[in-house]
Amino acid sequence: MTPIHFSFSTAFALGLTGLALHRHHLLSALLCLEGMMLSLFVALSLWSLQLGATNFSTAPMILLTFSACEASAGLGLLVATARTHGTDRLQNLNLLQC
């Protein structure tokens, strides 16, 4: 494994570990998701450049588009929960209670 591939797989694993272990605030969970998506985007971009296939070069842009949509939806949920509950702590959110 090259050092570049190792660094991007480590960045993805760190984001996944942060998402699994540090679930106190919604903002920290969203930041871990964004870090995972960024490492996937860079790894997919480097992979398409190494292959040299022109028909696969649109895949990183599609992933980046979905990442932007995910970030905007997450930010909207963060604002909505902060307004209704007063905090973004995940322990205070009860999905069964309306």
Image (cartoon, rainbow, N blue to C red):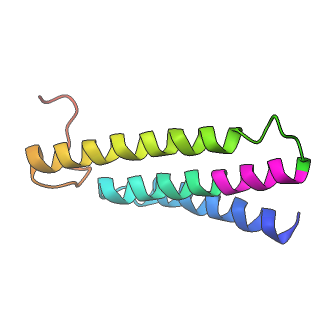
To which quarter of the image does residue 70 belong?
Answer: top left
Q: Position of residue 76 (x, y in %)?
A: 26, 43
Counting every numbered tag in the picture gives 0
Q: Position of residue 5 (x, y in %)?
A: 80, 62
- Which residue range is magenta in the image? 41-50
Report the front residue among 9 and 69.
69
Q: Position of residue 79 (x, y in %)?
A: 20, 48
Quadrant occupied by the N terminus: bottom right
Q: Does 55 sit left or right of 94 as displayed?
A: right
Q: Position of residue 18 (x, y in %)?
A: 49, 61
Q: Is residue 69 above or below residue 12?
A: above
Q: Does 46 sit left or right of 19 as displayed?
A: right
Residue at the bottom extreme, as displayed: 3
Residue 22 forms part of the magenta stretch: no
Give the overall secondary structure of the magenta segment: helix
Q: Does 83 sit left or right of 27 as displayed?
A: left
Q: Is residue 57 above or below residue 47?
A: above
Residue name at image x 81 percent, y 34 percent: 55
Residue name at image x 73 percent, y 55 percent: 43
Report the front residue among 32 and 21.
32
To which quarter of the image does residue 61 belong?
Answer: top right
Report the front residue among 32 and 20.
32
Q: Is residue 62 above or below residue 96?
A: below
Q: Is residue 55 above or below residue 89?
A: above
Quadrant occupied by the C terminus: top left
Residue name at image x 84 percent, y 40 percent: 54
Residue name at image x 67 percent, y 45 percent: 60
